[in-house]
Amino acid sequence: MAPHEANGIPVVDFSAWQPGAPIDQKKAVADQIIAACRTFGFVYITNHSVSPKRLEEAFAMSKKLYDLPFEKKQLAPHPPGFTVHRGYSKPGLEKVSNAMGDEADGDELVKDLRKVGDAKESYEIGSEQNTQQPNIWLPEDVLPGFRSFMTDFYWECNAAAEQIMSAMALGIGLDDENYFRQSHSGHNNQLRLLHYPPIPAAALETQAATRLDAHSDWPSMTMLFQDDCGGLQIEDPNVKGKFIDVPQVKDAIVMNIGDLMMRWSNDMLKSTLHRVGLPPKQDRFTGDDRMTRERYSIPYFVSPEGSHIVECLPPCIDEKHPAKYEPIKWNDYMLMRASMQY
Ligand SMILES: O=C(O)CCC(=O)C(=O)O
Ligand SMILES: [Fe+2]
């Protein structure tokens, strides 16, 4: 029998969600997703529309990308600044170098940290029709088939996202199952290929480096595909500051609510802090450096149109829960969030 949870986090079997299925059957799936999103803000979804074969191909393509020499990957560079999120971002070394201290101090830890590899590298892809965020591709001969595969995969992910959002609409209690489709054309989503190279365990343990700091995602929701390395953690819904592992469930989507959906749902659904740290013990190499395994993950961020006005959903408002937020455009919300970061 399929598992119903992994480390306490609900696993929802999506196979009963079929276009012509009886409403009770669909509602059962929808309710399970919403229940998980109310407590954890995270839920595993199995038997969704992205096939295991396609996922295997996507991870294989991502590996091919990251196996390329640095100079080749740099042929599709992420533009400087925060306005366009496309193309290849090389590993950020700021944290690591900050912790290195004075070269002359001879400290063992400092020496260790000198060997610290790259914390993470990423490649961002969007809709080919999104003119505000034009894609940045490698020359075709550098990685043949990459562009066409990722363009198709982007829309396959969106098809799964549409079904999940339909289930969410039903689970929230909206009359129209297609409610979220009106504002989510799919052109504003973001496919991210992430690679966390091997790194000495000591660097993560001493927090001299992190793979990915604790954060919440901004958009409506995120669908994450992860390999079996481990290291993803979410904040325990019952204990602030305590993080629990989100182990791999093979081929499952790890779906999580973003800040925008939390606001949209008048805080009924939770946008939960999550981070990527040290992989579980058994995944570590035993050499002197105790190098951790590398990790690959593929998040897919789902956002509405920039001009869409997000207003607390009626089923999430009652006498005990009056609307907490003013209506806001997704574009304005992003600007507000970006300005808060400085
Ligand atoms: O790599 C992961 O598993 C997490 C990625 C993530 O949280 C993000 O990119 O926002
Ligand atoms: Fe995230």
Image (cartoon, rainbow, N blue to C red):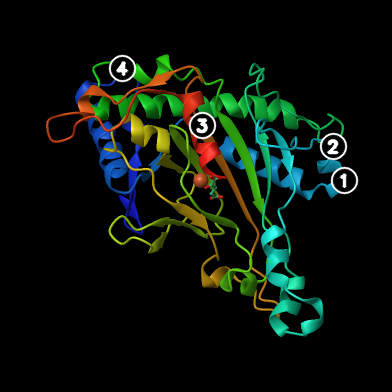
Is residue 47 shown above or below 196?
A: above
Q: Which residue is mark 4?
A: 20
* Residue at left offset 41%, top offset 38%: 259
Locate residue 41, reporting x and y percent: 35, 44
**Where residue 115 appears, x then y in whole percent?**
76, 71
Residue at 20%, 28% (x, y): give it.
317
Q: Residue at x 51, y 24 (%)?
A: 331
What amino acid does circle 3 point to?
Met
Q: Of the two numbered discs 3 and 2 on the same chain, state the one appearing first in sequence.
A: 2
Tell me if 253 is positioned left or right of 31 in this view: right
Q: Nearer the viewer, mark 3 or mark 2?
A: 3
Label 4: few (<14), some (14–19) or many (≥20) C-alpha neighbours in 10 Å: few
Distance between mark 1 and mark 3 Cα atoms: 32 Å
Q: Height in image: 127 above or below 96?
A: above
The local secondary structure at tag 3 comes to helix
Q: Quadrant of residue 286?
A: bottom right
Q: Residue 334: x and y, percent? A: 51, 31
Tell me which label, 1 or 4, sits earlier in the chain: 4
> Percent position (x, y) of residue 324?
27, 33
1 or 4: mark nearer the eye: 1
Q: Earlier in the sequence, mark 4 or mark 3?
A: 4
Q: Are marks 2 and 1 in contact (CB under 8 Å)?
A: yes
Q: Are marks 1 and 3 in contact (CB under 8 Å)?
A: no
Q: Circle 1 — which element? A: helix
Frontmost residue, 287 versus 126: 126
